[in-house]
Image (cartoon, grey):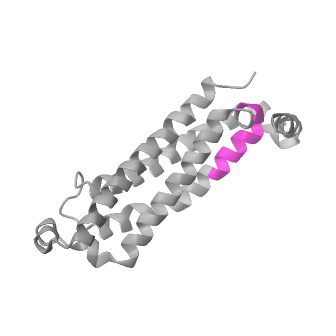
């Protein structure tokens, strides 16, 4: 597998698009800037929703309203990340394609996308469940609802940890390059 990736990286680095990205001085810094700003938008949107689940942010605003404000931003920005990330890979294929940290980042990204999509779908499918305030939620003492709230907090914590892992892995790529 490493040999195939190495050959693919060599081929990709020899393409005209890769050569252009490598030789035009402003392209890589511009792509990296757009990529980093996009990461900030996605990370902050996801984490603000996770903080709301933990009631650390916008306590008086119903969770469905918070998710309607922040989660839709994630999806188009993820497309920008895909585009800029792909162009950065084309410009420097060995840096990513032969780097285990890159694959860790991609695996964490898949998990983060699944967690975010599941949360968004859950809130969209039963907004009334999420809109009840704290006093009404605990007054009913419905075990299934309490368990769902605990699970939501566990998933919100996992989401924060996964998004942080993506940030760290993204930075580590520069320091764990292949030969």
Specify whether 110 is left or right of 99: left
Decide: is 120 above or below 28.
below
Q: Quadrant of residue 128?
A: bottom left
Left/right placement of residue 112 relative to residue 119 reads right
Q: Residue at x 10, y 68 (%)?
A: 135
**From the viewer's perspective, is residue 174 above or below residue 109?**
above
Residues 154 and 14: in front is 154
Tell me which segment is drawn in magenta. 82-95
Quarter of the image where the C terminus is located: top right
Q: Residue furthest front?
A: 143
Residue under the image location 24 percent in, 73 percent down: 131
Q: Nearer the viewer, residue 123 or 40?
A: 123
Quadrant housing residue 22: top right
- Which quadrant holds residue 49? bottom left
Say left or right for 88 vs 67: right
Q: Can you name the residue that lies furthest to the top here?
A: 179
In this rendering, the answer to whether 16 lies above or below 176 is: below
Residue 93 magenta-drawn?
yes
Q: Position of residue 105 (x, y in %)?
A: 58, 41
Q: Which quarter of the rendered picture does the N terminus lie within? A: top right
Left or right of residue 115, residue 84 in this image: right
Can residue 43 be seen? yes
Residue found at x 60% / y 40%: 104
Q: Is 142 a magenta residue?
A: no
Q: Residue at x 48, y 39 (%)?
A: 165
User: Can you see residue 30?
Assistant: no
- Residue 8 coordinates in the image, percent (x, y): 86, 40
- On the image, the x and y values in percent for residue 134 come to 15, 65
Residue 96 point in image, percent of width and height: 70, 35
């Amino acid at each position: 597998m490493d040999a195939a990736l190495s050959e693919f990286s060599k081929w990709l680095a020899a393409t005209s698009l890769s050569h252009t990205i490598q030789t035009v001085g402003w392209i890589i810094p511009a792509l990296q800037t757009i990529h980093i700003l996009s990461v900030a938008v996605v990370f902050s949107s996801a984490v603000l929703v996770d903080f709301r689940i933990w009631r650390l942010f916008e306590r008086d605003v119903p969770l469905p309203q918070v998710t309607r404000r922040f989660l839709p931003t994630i999806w188009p920005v993820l497309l920008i990340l895909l585009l800029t990330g792909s162009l950065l890979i084309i410009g420097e294929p060995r840096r990513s394609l032969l780097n285990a940290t890159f694959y860790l980042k991609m695996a964490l990204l898949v998990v983060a996308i699944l967690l975010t999509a599941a949360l968004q779908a859950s809130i969209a499918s039963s907004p009334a469940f999420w809109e009840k305030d704290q006093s009404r939620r605990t007054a009913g003492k419905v075990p299934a609802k309490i368990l769902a709230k605990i699970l939501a907090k566990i998933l919100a914590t996992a989401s924060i940890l996964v998004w942080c892992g993506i940030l760290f892995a993204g930075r580590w790529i520069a320091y764990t390059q292949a030969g």
